[in-house]
Image (cartoon, rainbow, N blue to C red):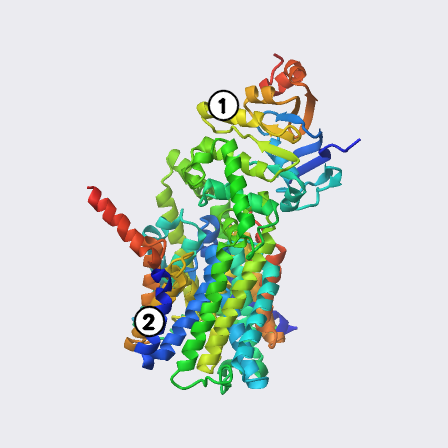
Amino acid sequence: MSPPALSVRGLSKAFGALAVTRGVDLDLEPGARVGLIGPNGAGKTTLIHLLSGTLRADAGTIQLNGAAIERLRPEHRVRRGLARTHQINTLLPESNARDNVAVAIAERERLAWRAVWYRQRWAKCREEAQARLEAMDLGSDADRPVCELAYGQQRLLEIAIALALQPRVLLLDEPAAGVPSGEATVIHAALARLPSDMAILLIEHDMDLVFRFAREIVVLVQGSVLCRGTPEQTRADARVREAYLGTRA
Amino acid sequence: MIARLTPWLLALGFYFAFAEQLALGTNVLVMILLTLSLDLCLGRAGILTLGQSAFFGMGAYVAGIVALRVTEDPLIGLAVATLASAALGALTGALILHTEGAALLMLTLALSALLEEFANHATAWTGGADGLQGMKLAPLLGTFRFDLFKHTAYLYSLAVLLVWFLVTQIVIVSPFGRSIDGIRQSPARMRAIGTPVWWRRLCVYTLSAAMAGSAGALSAQTTRFVGLTTLSVLVSGTAVVMLVLGGTRRRYGAFLGAAVYVLVQDYAAQINPFHWMLIVGILLMLTVLFLEGGLASLPEALLRVRRRESKR
Amino acid sequence: MTAWITTLLDGLAYGMVLFIISVGLTITMGLMRIVNLAHGAFAMIGGYVAAVSIDHGLSWALAALLGSAAAGIAGGIAEIFLYRPLYRKGELAQMLLTFGLVFVVTGLLTLAFGVDFQRIPLPPSLSGEVSLGFRSYPLYRLFLIAVGALLAAGLWLGIDRSLYGARLRAAVDNPAMARGIGMNVDRLFTATFVFGCALAGFGGVVGSELLLIEPAYALKHLVTFLVVVVVGGHASFKGSFAAALLIGSVETFGKFYLPSLAPYVSFLLVLVLLLWRPHGVLPAKSLS
């Protein structure tokens, strides 16, 4: 039996006296669609930072396709096949949309360190970048600088860049956050089109989106996993309602 | 195409038209090279540094020491000096490039201050406060003598500048150059796509150090003198001023800034040796407050103003 | 043994001077988070104004007061017209503008006074030596130590622990929000900057025996002041206090006991400290 795409055991992180992540266990099979939900302050984004390497965990292990990565720097985890999007857009503001994606492709193809003999391969990177933008309906805006794009388009670009890295595991940190409801459906549609063999962990507050997208839901409360199960099981679980609403409903 | 060649044509024109001012002209060329090195490091990679003087001085002293003790061949001196500065850049860069912002700035300052103190005390090698004097240079390529009127010196410097300019142009448009630009815009984004940020920064820093070292070597060889001032923070500061004045990340921004600065300083110094600091300071402040892209962006800025006026 | 103690006192005195001058920079660079390379220029202005005042027959105390006030006023004008446009333009722009300001002030002072040192003669009440039991020691240096200690205590109480400090930090963290709850952010910033520069001016005056007043002052000591602030941890008064004393003592001991190594020691110290703790040796709890 092949190992899960992503396997987390006992992940913990504290800032001084404040324990933000407490012994989190998580498994993502190839092709998984897992939604991570929890009330504000539960530590969802911190968990993503720990997985992507932006933060170093105090304890616990993270295995990507069976190989331990908890000691690796973010850029090395990306090389092994783990990509993420950010809750707040982290794009190259002065470059245009196509270049944002092309640079990621060049990095993936080990082209980005080159100063000579790159023309053909760089042209291919740009072609692929254009194709990926078209897949996100951003093709016509490929030449526009990122700062001129609508917020929803920027969110889509974040996802496009992450996809361009051809990761095996994708962490999506609130992809629809801050997007006006008119544009949110585009994001929902893009998520539905994600490759079926890619393991995806989705953080979202938009319950509609999560329950439609996820086949498994993990509920995080105050840094530890409260429960996990199918969307129906989670919806029915009294503890989840209590965690969100604070009273016995 | 003509626009691209203009600075080089001007430089050649200067050679013929102002044959008595070639010492000044050579100084301009050396400063352009120094500013170009800073544009690579600060302008393109976003590495905040006031420590470029360490590499300039290193290059100058090594070139001087080679000429006095090893060989008078200028090209060998240039090569050794460039390599030495590159080595210094790689070493110091490896030490400090994991920091950013103000902390990095402090470290670059501390390092160059350290080097300056060392040079002050290592009098056997550097001549201490008196500096290195009396170096002789063999004819360039065996034929071109370094004459008193700086004919050879000027064209030699121009050639070295051209070579480095082409190198930087090649680097800037390459995928490597793009990733450096990305690191400047958003290190977080570049990390998120798997870029080894620290390594790329180190590469740029080393290249920039090599360039500054070449500039120092040229300075030493064309003036036959190396003093402690080559290592002072004033050199770094001047380079920053020249860069900002001309405009960062512009093909000829460094050229414009260095030329304007050196010429203004020379002119102001003739009136009063102390005025130039005041003038340069004012120029710098005005540029920062009102002309963000530097002088090289002046045409665009004026166009924008004219467009706004015509809309009324 | 006695030599050791006097060297220590010398180091403390020097450290206190560094602290008094640099603490204003802790306020501007640390609390207000602007890259301010021109801090030494304000210290210098204080020194020059004091020197001129004494030349015109004013008492030392009054001269010191005038020097601080002049530095403060210069700071206020600079803040309103030069620094304020740059709060949002980023570190590079601030670094460049303040560097240009250093050039301008240095140039102006050279024009007005020439390149020689300015002397600020000590008042009779503070000169001379005092018996410490085993030997006598300059009274003025003890005065410096006392003033520095008082200042540190006063600042810690007055800013770190006060409502003023909290409001300042709030305004720096989120100016829009602070304005939204009615704080006059502009006035707060200007007042704070004036205070920081006045402190610098005061330091320039009282420290003129150790850091001589000359036009090259601002550039010469640029690295030292910055180092105290950054090593001390940007926004921490305790930190810059500790850093100033550490650097002052190390440099003074170095000059006395290891003269050939002395100049390197302080820079090496800085390098080691910054590499070990890039965010400052005693990071302030108030830093976000």
The residue identified by callout 1 is A185
Q: x%, y% of residue B251?
A: 41, 59
Q: Chain of mark 2?
A: B
Taking the image as drawn, is residue B188 in sight? Answer: no
Taking the image as drawn, is residue C112 in sight? Answer: yes
- Do discs 1 and 2 belong to a common subunit? no
The amino acid type, in three-letter code, at marker 2 is Leu
Question: What residue is drawn where x is 66% and y is 73%?
Answer: C1
**Of A4 and C104, which appears nearest the observer?**
A4
Closer to us: mark 1 or mark 2? 1
The residue identified by callout 2 is B263
Q: Secondary structure at mark 1?
A: helix
Q: Is residue A226 left or right of residue B6?
A: right
Position of residue B54 relative to residue C94, above or below, is below
Position of residue B32 relative to residue C27, above or below, is below
Q: Chain of mark 1?
A: A
Q: Is residue C199 left or right of residue B179?
A: left
**To which quarter of the image does residue A23 belong?**
top right
Question: What residue is drawn where x is 44% and y is 23%?
Answer: A182
The amino acid type, in three-letter code, at marker 1 is Thr
Quick one: label 2, few (<14), some, or many (20+) residues within 10 Å?
some
